[in-house]
């Protein structure tokens, strides 16, 4: 069962507005932007709240991903109970990070995204067909927001229909979020590893045209099976939850801003800026797992000592008034100013282009199919995730 525990500062949201950072985070950004904070598990961290400081920490080679335990932000789980999987390069430093990240670069080129676009558009329409056939009321999260990006990432990886169904069943077990027991986390990680190991074994024998097949056919001599499993599971697990909750929370934000909803529905010229602005405004990844200082260094006017942890509070950094004019306003035409939801520098999210493509497909498709889409319950009855790296609503009942 999930642990009953206070939501740590980097994940806190405003109880009066689910899109906004918590009021304490706002205060910290104003008064103590490099804030020393003790997590509920007793670990001290630095919480980085300003946009410029977050960008700097992402590019400072003295701040290590590899030395940061996966369990830093997980209560009740010891460091030796959860280890970095081979191939999970998001948790590595150069040169291993560089070597592994390079192998997936061809899966996220502009050309590859153009090739995927008609397939993803069909997936979106199929999900909407099923939602329309079932009829209102529907839970937007289970009817569209989750299945669309899940099926999209399965398409990218090259999973068969049977494998997709198996993974969908597996994801249903992941609802506990961050505040899960050590046993639950280990069981889920083990099940995901076994699932992907079988797929990689099959693709070694007969590579497909998806990313897993590409890793086998183009990099099979330099990557062992465990690395391909780790790379694939990293994208599979990270590739749909963030996008799903951005779609769900984005719909709620558009309900609150009908002028922006109409703009996104009717004007395809705003799609590029709209996708980035929704990522900035929503910042469903409230914070990352952080970095570890390998030596004493200066960041944001304070000294971070070797061995200390820094955690970027992305939701409040993306609302930094020193960087964004009127940061609490959703403006889908906002002049592009790179938001930090995807990270920055060598660790910028490899799948960012895929996420943005999915957002540009999903919102117009939903809004055009259901022009009368609206909440089926009062807004105040919605329930949101608590202690979770990815923020979102547990359910969004809608009618049309």
Image (cartoon, rainbow, N blue to C red):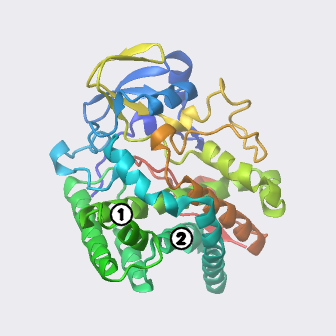
Q: Is residue 90 visible?
A: no
Along the viewing direction, whichever of 17 and 369 lies nearer the viewer: 369
Quadrant hosting residue 196: bottom left
Label located before the other in sequence (1 or 2): 2
Left or right: residue 381 compared with residue 35 = right
Q: Give how far apart the Cα atoms at labels 1 and 2 are.
A: 14 Å
Q: Residues within 10 Å of mark 2 (few under 14, many from 20)?
A: many
Number of the label disc, if any, that sits on residue 180: none
Along the viewing direction, whichever of 117 and 121 lies nearer the viewer: 117
Q: Eyeballing the image, is 295 above or below 57?
A: above
Q: Residue at x 42, y 41 (%)?
A: 288
Q: Eyeballing the image, is 100 above or below 374?
A: above
Q: Whole-percent x and y of residue 219?
A: 36, 64
Q: Whole-percent x and y of residue 19?
A: 60, 44
Q: Secondary structure at mark 1?
A: helix
Left or right: residue 96 compared with residue 359 = left
Q: Residues within 10 Å of mark 1 (few under 14, many from 20)?
A: many
Q: Residue at x 47, y 73 (%)?
A: 210
Left or right: residue 26 compared with residue 386 = right
Quadrant hosting residue 347: top left
Q: Whole-percent x and y of residue 74?
A: 29, 44
Q: Secondary structure at mark 2?
A: helix
Q: Which residue is mark 1?
A: 233
Along the viewing direction, whichever of 209 and 253 lies nearer the viewer: 209
Q: Quadrant of the C terminus?
A: bottom right
Q: Which residue is mark 2?
A: 152
Q: Whole-percent x and y of residue 350?
A: 49, 52
């Amino acid at each position: 069962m999930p642990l009953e525990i206070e939501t740590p500062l980097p994940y806190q949201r405003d109880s009066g507005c689910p899109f906004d950072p918590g009021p304490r985070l706002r205060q910290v950004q104003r008064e103590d932007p490099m804030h020393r904070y003790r997590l509920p598990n007793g670990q001290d961290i630095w919480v980085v709240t300003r946009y410029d400081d977050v960008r700097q920490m992402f590019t400072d080679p003295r701040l290590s991903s590899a030395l940061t335990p996966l369990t830093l932000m997980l209560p009740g789980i010891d460091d030796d109970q959860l280890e970095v999987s081979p191939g999970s390069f998001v948790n590595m430093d150069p040169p291993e990070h560089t070597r592994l990240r390079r192998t997936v670069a061809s899966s996220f080129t502009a050309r590859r995204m153009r090739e995927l676009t008609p397939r993803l558009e069909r997936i979106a329409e199929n999900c909407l067909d099923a939602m329309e056939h079932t009829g209102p009321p529907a839970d937007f999260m289970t009817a569209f927001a989750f299945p669309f990006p899940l099926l999209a990432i399965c398409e990218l990886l090259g999973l068969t229909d049977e494998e997709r169904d198996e993974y969908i069943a597996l994801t249903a077990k992941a609802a506990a979020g961050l505040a899960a027991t050590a046993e639950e986390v280990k069981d889920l990680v083990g099940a995901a590893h076994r699932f992907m190991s079988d797929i990689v074994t099959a693709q070694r024998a007969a590579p497909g045209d998806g990313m897993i097949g590409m890793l086998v056919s183009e990099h099979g001599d330099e990557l062992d099976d465990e690395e391909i499993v780790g790379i694939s599971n990293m994208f599979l697990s990270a590739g749909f939850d963030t996008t799903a909750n951005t779609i769900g929370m984005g719909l709620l934000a558009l309900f609150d801003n009908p002028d922006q909803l109409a703009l996104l529905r009717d004007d395809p010229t705003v799609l590029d800026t709209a996708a980035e602005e929704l990522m900035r405004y929503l910042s469903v990844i409230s914070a990352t797992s952080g970095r570890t200082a390998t030596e004493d260094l200066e960041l944001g006017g304070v000294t971070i000592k070797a061995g200390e942890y820094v955690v970027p509070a992305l939701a409040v950094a993306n609302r930094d008034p020193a960087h964004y004019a009127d940061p609490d306003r959703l403006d889908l035409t906002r002049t592009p100013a790179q938001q930090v939801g995807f990270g920055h520098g060598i660790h910028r999210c490899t799948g960012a282009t895929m996420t943005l493509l999915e957002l540009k497909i999903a919102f117009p498709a939903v809004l055009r199919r259901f022009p009368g889409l609206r909440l089926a319950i009062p807004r105040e009855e919605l329930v949101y995730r608590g202690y979770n790296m990815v923020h979102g609503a547990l359910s969004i009942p809608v009618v049309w």
